[in-house]
């Protein structure tokens, strides 16, 4: 009974601190994503990586993967209703984050094609070879188009199914992983001494 009372006391304290802990968790998650982007963006030898937009892209893609992953875990392991209020809130936040991700990728591409000769040469990663296939099929096709098509293009009947929920969330997570893979590998392949 002593352990049960101690456990109850600890849980009451943690529940009282829950809003603060949630806020701190969000701040630390965003800081870690941005920090990773800052570390990679200072590599001046690599035009795709050396961009001021990279930290923001890492934050947006991290939020996108976090939202989709949290939704999947909540639905699969905690039996949350995919169309319940909590997951509906996460789902509503997902679309502006996805739009921001697309905008930031566009900014990187535009900065490459309008930049120096070395940057223009590095922009080939978006249009030729295995990295272009990874980007267009994986990042754009799976990561962006699959969720958008399942949730908006096919109508409400399909958008409100469990299939659309799970496939959309999984596609978002896979798309973010492929985006990071594209940025890191294509970024290191196309350097200033190509």
Image (spheres, rainbow, N blue to C red):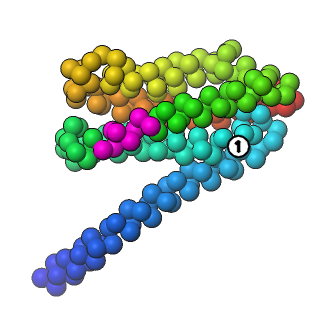
Q: Nearer the viewer, residue 146 or 181?
A: 146
In-image side of 174 versus 115 (left or right): left
Q: Is residue 164 magenta?
A: no
Residue 95, how many percent across, how many down?
41, 35
Q: Is residue 93 magenta?
A: yes
User: Is residue 100 something one can see in this rendering?
Assistant: yes
Tell me the quadrant of the picture where the C terminus can be found: top right
Sort mark 1 into few (<14), some (14-19) or many (20+) by Cα contacts within 10 Å. some
In-image side of 154 versus 142 (left or right): left
- Give the quarter of the image for residue 16: bottom left
Q: Kindly state the secondary structure of the residue where label 1 is placed.
A: loop
Q: Nearer the viewer, residue 6 or 38?
A: 38
Tell me the quadrant of the picture where the N terminus can be found: bottom left
Residue positioned 28% across, 77% down in the render: 13
Magenta span = 89-96
Dominant SS of magenta comes to helix
Residue positioned 33% across, 38% down in the render: 91
In-image side of 44 versus 140 (left or right): right
Q: Which residue is mark 1?
A: 52
Residue positioned 38% across, 26% down in the render: 147
User: Is residue 179 something one can see in this rendering?
Assistant: no
- Give the quarter of the image for residue 173: top left
């Amino acid at each position: 009974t002593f352990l049960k009372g101690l456990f109850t006391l600890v849980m009451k304290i943690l529940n009282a601190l829950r809003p603060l802990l949630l806020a701190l968790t969000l701040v630390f998650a965003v800081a870690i994503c941005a920090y990773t982007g800052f570390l990679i963006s200072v590599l001046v030898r690599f035009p795709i990586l050396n961009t001021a937009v990279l930290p923001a892209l890492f934050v947006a893609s991290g939020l996108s993967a976090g939202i989709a992953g949290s939704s999947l875990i909540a639905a699969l392991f905690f039996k949350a209703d995919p169309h319940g209020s909590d997951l509906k809130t996460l789902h509503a936040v997902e679309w502006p984050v996805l739009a921001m991700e697309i905008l930031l990728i566009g900014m990187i591409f535009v900065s490459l094609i309008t930049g120096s000769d070395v940057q223009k040469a590095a922009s080939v990663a978006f249009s030729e070879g295995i990295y272009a296939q990874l980007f267009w099929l994986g990042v754009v096709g799976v990561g962006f188009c699959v969720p958008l098509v399942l949730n908006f293009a096919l109508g409400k009947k399909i958008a409100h199914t469990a299939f659309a929920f799970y496939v959309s969330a999984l596609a978002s997570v896979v798309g973010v992983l492929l985006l990071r893979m594209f940025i890191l590998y294509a970024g290191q392949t196309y350097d200033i001494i190509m």
